[in-house]
Amino acid sequence: MDLTLATQVVEGATIVVVGGEIDVYTAPRLRDKITELVGDGVHTLIIDMEAVEFLDSTGLGVLVGGLKKVRAHGGSLQLICTQERLLKIFRITGLAKVFTIHDSAESALAG
């Protein structure tokens, strides 16, 4: 399975819609996209993970790294995720307390 990435700007926030698998092979593409956006001055990121089918520790590391990058510029990185199997990973690793996780884009934009 591959990784798909699409970006859209909504109400001043950049939403990165991620699909497929975020693993040791594909995570560098997500990392590069986040790095590119931050380099372009985007510091309010929302990662939409509704179409993510698999997430491993490398993917988690990329998300944490992205959070550190935007916070270094006074920004934020929030997640959209309603899939229980992914939410369980965030809870088990303690990252549910690190990331703000929303159930919809509307909620993320309001928050």
Image (spheres, rainbow, N blue to C red):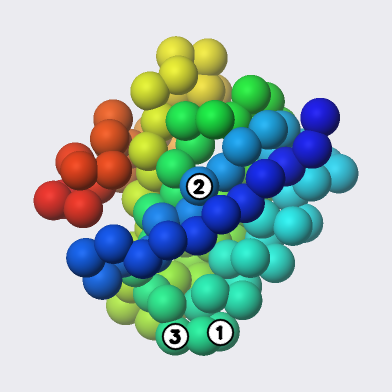
Q: Contact, CB < 8 Å: mark 1 with mark 2?
A: no
Q: Is residue 37 above or below residue 101?
A: below
Question: Which x, y percent locates residue 12?
Answer: 26, 71
Left or right: 28, with 101 as reference point: right
Left or right: 106, with 52 as reference point: left
User: Hey, what amino acid is under mark 2?
Assistant: Val
Residue 99 visible within the image: no
Q: Is residue 30 above or below residue 39?
A: above
Q: Is residue 84 above or below residue 46?
A: above
Q: CA distance from mark 1 to mark 3?
A: 5 Å
Q: CA distance from mark 1 to mark 2?
A: 19 Å
Question: Residue visible at 86% across and 44% down?
Answer: 25
User: Hey, what amino acid is under mark 1?
Assistant: Gly
Q: Which circle, 1 or 2, is nearer the viewer?
A: 2
Residue 89 visible within the image: yes
Q: Report crowding for label 1: few under 14, some 14 to 19, many 20 or more residues within 10 A (C-alpha).
A: few
| Secondary structure type for disc 2 | strand
State which quadrant residue 54 falls in: top right
Question: Which x, y percent locates residue 88?
Answer: 48, 17
Question: Residue visible at 44% across and 43% down?
Answer: 48
The residue labelled by disc 1 is 39
Residue situated in front as seen by the camera: 22 or 74:
22
Question: Residue visible at 44% across and 14% down?
Answer: 84
The residue labelled by disc 2 is 17
